[in-house]
Image (tube, rainbow, N blue to C red):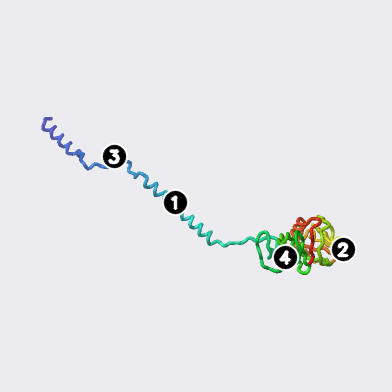
Amino acid sequence: MGRGTRAAGGARRRAATPSAGPATSAASANPTYSGRPKSGRGATFSVAMMTLAALAAVGVLAAQAEATAPRVRAQGSNASSAKVSSTSKNGSSTGSSTVALPANSGSGTRIVYSPSKQRIWLAEGSTVERTMQVVPGTIAPPNGSFTVYAKTPASEGGDGVAVEFVVRFDSSSSTTYGFDAEANVTGLPPAPTGRTGGVRMAQLDAQALYEFASVGTTVVVL
């Protein structure tokens, strides 16, 4: 084969091979290019901002729910322990004359009992520590000032009923007068039917009076 034949073949090969020009692909220009966009700081910042926005929305909804929730005021469980209209330690006042400490009820530490109002006040000077509704006995004590002469955790009333937290007063009388609670009875007991000078009350009230009173404490009956 002559030189003309070889020259013609070389020209054909050069024509079939594409020439490398300035318009190169992204892969040839950057050997490390993978074809996927990189996640940079911009994407991370966007995710953080969306998270903060979601948390802020939750906080706003919680605050709105709390603001619109109904308010419930707690009440005491012992209904017989009413607040008083005279000055008390908690500073509260109902303005009800039925629970106000009666006038001319003495002074100092004392138990004030009004059979007509069926109520007792535990008083320290002009301060009422506690007041409670009671069930009078079938024999009412005379009006006057007396002293506690005995305390008994449990006993039997003049009507034969088992009683607790017994505080007796007026030792000069032939009738036994005292304050107590009927055993195994929740709340105010029924009115006694037998002959008794015992003044009955709810167990929690009777316990409070029992702890308040000492032998020698004044009892004022109005």
- Residue 30: assigned label: 3
Could one spot residue 192 in this view of the protein?
A: no
Question: Which of disc 4 and disc 3 is earlier in sequence?
Answer: 3
Of residues 141 and 203, which is closer to you in this image? Answer: 141
* Alpha carbon distance from label 3 to label 2: 117 Å
Amino acid type assigned to the residue bearing label 3 in the image: Asn
Amino acid type assigned to the residue bearing label 1 in the image: Leu
Nearest to viewer (mark 3 / mark 4): 4
Vertical order, 24 against 142 (above or below): above
* Alpha carbon distance from label 3 to label 4: 98 Å
Q: Residue at x 55, y 61 (%)?
A: 69
The residue indicated by pointer 1 is: 52
Question: Which of disc 2 and disc 3 is earlier in sequence?
Answer: 3
Residue 25: image location, x then y, percent: 26, 42
* Alpha carbon distance from label 1 to label 3: 37 Å
- Residue 151: assigned label: none
- Residue 101: assigned label: 4
Q: Secondary structure at mark 4?
A: loop
Which residue of the protein is positioned furthest toward the right in this rendering? 174
Residue 212: image location, x then y, percent: 76, 56
Tell me which corner region of the image, top left, top right, bottom left or bottom right, holds residue 222: bottom right
Q: Secondary structure at mark 3?
A: loop
Amino acid type assigned to the residue bearing label 4 in the image: Leu
Q: Are marks 1 and 3 in contact (CB under 8 Å)?
A: no
Is residue 28 rendered to the left or right of residue 173? left
Q: Secondary structure at mark 1?
A: helix
The residue indicated by pointer 2 is: 173
- Mark 2 is surrounded, within 10 Å at the Cα level, by few (under 14), some (14 to 19) or many (20 or more) other residues, namely few
Q: Residue at x 51, y 57 (%)?
A: 63
* Alpha carbon distance from label 4 to label 1: 61 Å
Vertical order, 67 against 43 (above or below): below
Question: Which of disc 3 and disc 1 is earlier in sequence?
Answer: 3
